[in-house]
Amino acid sequence: MSPRFPAVSSPQSGPCVGVVGDVYRILVSGEQTAGAYSVVEAIVPPGSGPPPHRHSREDEGFYVLEGELTITVDGRRETLSPGMFGNLPVGSLHFFRNEGSVPVRMLITVAPAGFEQMFMEVGVPLPPGSKSAPPPSHDDIARLLEASNRYGVEIQPPG
């Protein structure tokens, strides 16, 4: 890892990708924090969210800026509104869903860093400042499922 250095993100900076219908913009990467953590801005449209999954390497946190996000962690269901934070410990089985009618905008923290690289690997590049992503294709989902093993993520079928 390279040494830490100051990083500043503006609304138009940071790589932006569409990942299975959501928008992810890297605000600070593990490369910029010597692997300590990363922060990603996410826009999750109504009805969107990943299937149940478990991280084997990192803790993950969600800070909701706009909208309401429903998270389920080890069977416990919570609704996060703006200003609320949810912590998802490493190894917890979790998923989130936007059950509302407006997009959710949130910050995702991941520690240690590295998981943001999966978004960059499987995502569809989007212009800076994008607020929406194309709907997921079968190829997008297949790429995500294939890459998840390399990033220590176990994806479980919904149900």
Image: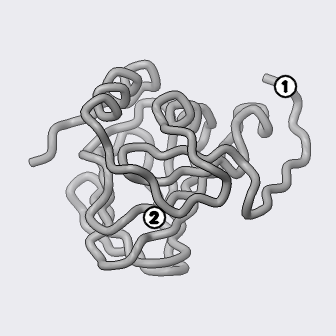
What residue is at 79 percent from the left and 61 percent from the top?
10
Mark seen at residue 86:
2
Q: Is residue 72 above or below residue 35?
A: below
Q: Nearer the viewer, residue 84 or 39?
A: 39
What is the distance, in whole Å, between disc 1 and disc 2 at their CAs? Answer: 30 Å
Residue type highlighted by circle 2: Gly
Q: Which quadrant does the N terminus fall into?
A: top right
What residue is at 87 percent from the left and 37 percent from the top?
4
What residue is at 48 percent from the left and 46 percent from the top?
18
> Considering only order in the chain, which callout, 2 or 1, is on the residue closer to the N terminus?
1
Residue type highlighted by circle 1: Ser
Q: Is residue 76 above or below residue 139?
A: below
Q: Alpha-carbon neighbours of circle 2 within 10 Å: few (<14), some, or many (≥20)?
A: some
How are the colours assigned in the image? Answer: one colour
Residue 54: x percent and y percent? Answer: 33, 38
Mark 1 element type: loop
In the image, 3: left or right of 35?
right
What residue is at 50 percent from the left and 49 percent from the top?
60
Q: Is residue 48 above or below residue 93?
A: below
Which is closer to the viewer, label 1 or label 2? Answer: 1
In the image, 128: left or right of 56?
right
Residue 90: x percent and y percent? Answer: 44, 41
Q: Quadrant of residue 41?
A: bottom right
Which residue of the protein is positioned furthest toward the left in this rendering? Answer: 159
Q: Nearer the viewer, residue 9 or 82?
A: 9
The residue that label 1 is drawn on is 2
